[in-house]
Amino acid sequence: MKKIIICFVLIFCANLLIYPVEQPSTMKDSTEMNVASAKAIVPECDNNHFITDNDIDKIANKVINKMEQRNDKKAGTKLLSIVRWVAIGVVAIIILLLSMIIWGCHKIYKKLKAIERDQNNDTQAGYRHTPARRIVITEEKIDKIAQDVEVIKKEVINDCKPMLEKTGSQGEHDEGKRNAYQPPRREPDKTIYAKPLQNGCLKTTEEMEAIYIIKVEQGNVARFTVYEKDEQMLRAIKNKEYILEQFCETRGSSINAKKIANVNAGQVEQIEAGIWRVIKKAEIMFIK
């Protein structure tokens, strides 16, 4: 701010030196004009050797004109001087205002920089101190949790000792029971050989004459399939109208077929001793 005021004073002094007051010059001009007018009047008097009324009027008119010109010039000079000083004052005020604005902006900029610097310092200080604090808190929590776990572990072991002893005794007793227990044996499925009858039933017979095999699972219901033996299969293929069609759903052609493959077993039920009625036909396929 001091530098700005000094610059303003220097500019003001320079204007004073460049534009000085012109009063002495005006006075000098007035004297010179009076002398010149006198010189102009004297020759006329010398030439005429006498002064008339007309000469006096002329001289008076000339003097009046000279005085008016001098007054107009003096007034113009004063007006220019006033305008010049007003302009100098306006320029000085503008310079002063601009200087104050620049100085204020500079102060605001410095304050903002200081605030930003303080924030950065606080942030860096927080980053430096926060990790250590977190580590200390974490370690304290871990130590406390470990101690609590040890205490709970001891309490659980003490509470579970009677239960473990009781469980051990029960386990030995159960193991003895498991060793003594034997699951019941499942009897194998009973296989019965059967041959077809004209009324659509199957009759039990010897293996040599059997076309079908009946496997009894439980009660009077059983499953049956074609007996997959070469002699029986060839005989069934040749006489399929009497042996197969009433008891089986066939797939493929029996022409030139040499074997029969069981696809799905059929179901039969026992209606009397040695006689089985077909509930569901079996599914077979002819193989060439």
Image (cartoon, rainbow, N blue to C red):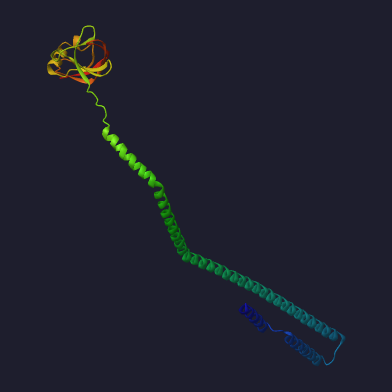
In this orientation, which residue lies closer to the viewer: 141 or 51? 141
Judge from the rendering whether residue 5 lies leftward or rightward of residue 205; answer left or right: right
Quadrant of the image occupied by residue 266: top left
Q: Do we see residue 111 in this rendering? A: yes
Give the percent coordinates (x, y) of residue 179: 26, 35
Query: In which quarter of the view is residue 102 placed?
Result: bottom right
Residue 216, compared with residue 165, is above or below; it is: above
Q: Quadrant of the N terminus?
A: bottom right
Looking at the image, can residue 252 be seen?
no
Q: Residue at 47%, 66% (x, y): give it.
A: 128
> Residue 52, image x and y in percent?
86, 87
- Measuring 52% from the left and 66% from the top, which residue is drawn there? 122
Look at 40% across and 49% down and name the residue there.
158
Nearest to the observer: residue 96 or residue 118: 118
Q: Residue furthest right?
A: 53
Looking at the rendered structure, the number of numbered marks drawn on it comes to: 0
In percent of width and height, residue 154 lies at 40, 52
